[in-house]
Amino acid sequence: VAPPPSLLSAGEAVRIKESKIELVKVADEDVSRKLSWTQGRLIFERQTLAEVVAEFNRYNRRQMVIADPAIAGRRVGGGFEATDIDSFIAALEHSFGIRAFPSPVEHPEAEVIRLVGTSQETTGDEPDPP
């Protein structure tokens, strides 16, 4: 038997996990952050690099891939223009110890940016292209 329909109020969200539906309260600052995309901004607070890259990739022709699995779970944060991938990459390199490598010259049409940890750069062990 399906539960009766209900309405959400401001500051509420629904979480669906497996077959369970749960009504949760959302803090005011979280509402602003989650709706920032409507103004062309993306705001992250301790999301994993994998989550942030996936969100950026939704808004950009140039795509980022995490070529170093060791950094996928690294927590990052900040506010960025959704289509300004270069500023995001600059922040990764400056503040989070992550390096970005553009598509190989022989495949510029791919427009893929590979992300790796700085430990790979210092050892010279650049990962193979995905």
Image (cartoon, rainbow, N blue to C red):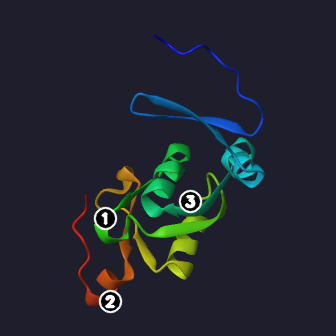
**13 on left or right of 105:** right
Q: Position of residue 80 (x, y in %)?
A: 66, 60
Label 2 Cα crowd, 10 Å radius (few <14 / some 14-19 / many 20+)? few
The disc at residue 89 is: none
Under mark 2, the amino acid is Thr
The disc at residue 122 is: 2
At x 75% / y 54%, what residue is drawn? 29
Number of callouts: 3
Looking at the image, tell me whether mark 2 or mark 3 is earlier in sequence order: 3
Under mark 3, the amino acid is Ile
**12 on left or right of 10:** left
* One can see residue 40 in this view: no
Q: Are marks 2 and 3 in contact (CB under 8 Å)?
A: no
Q: Secondary structure at mark 2?
A: helix
| Extreme-bottom residue of the structure | 122
Q: Nearer the viewer, residue 37 or 26?
A: 26
The disc at residue 85 is: 3
> Which of the 4 quarters of the picture holds residue 46?
bottom right
At x 51% / y 44%, what residue is drawn? 58
Q: Position of residue 126 (x, y in %)?
A: 26, 76
Looking at the image, tell me whether mark 3 or mark 1 is earlier in sequence order: 1
Looking at the image, tell me whether mark 1 or mark 2 is earlier in sequence order: 1
- What residue is shown with label 1? 67
Q: Position of residue 14 (x, y in %)?
A: 59, 33
* One can see residue 67 in this view: yes
Which quarter of the image is occupied by the C terminus?
A: bottom left
Label 2 – label 3 distance at C-alpha: 24 Å
Label 1 – label 2 distance at C-alpha: 16 Å
**128 on left or right of 32:** left
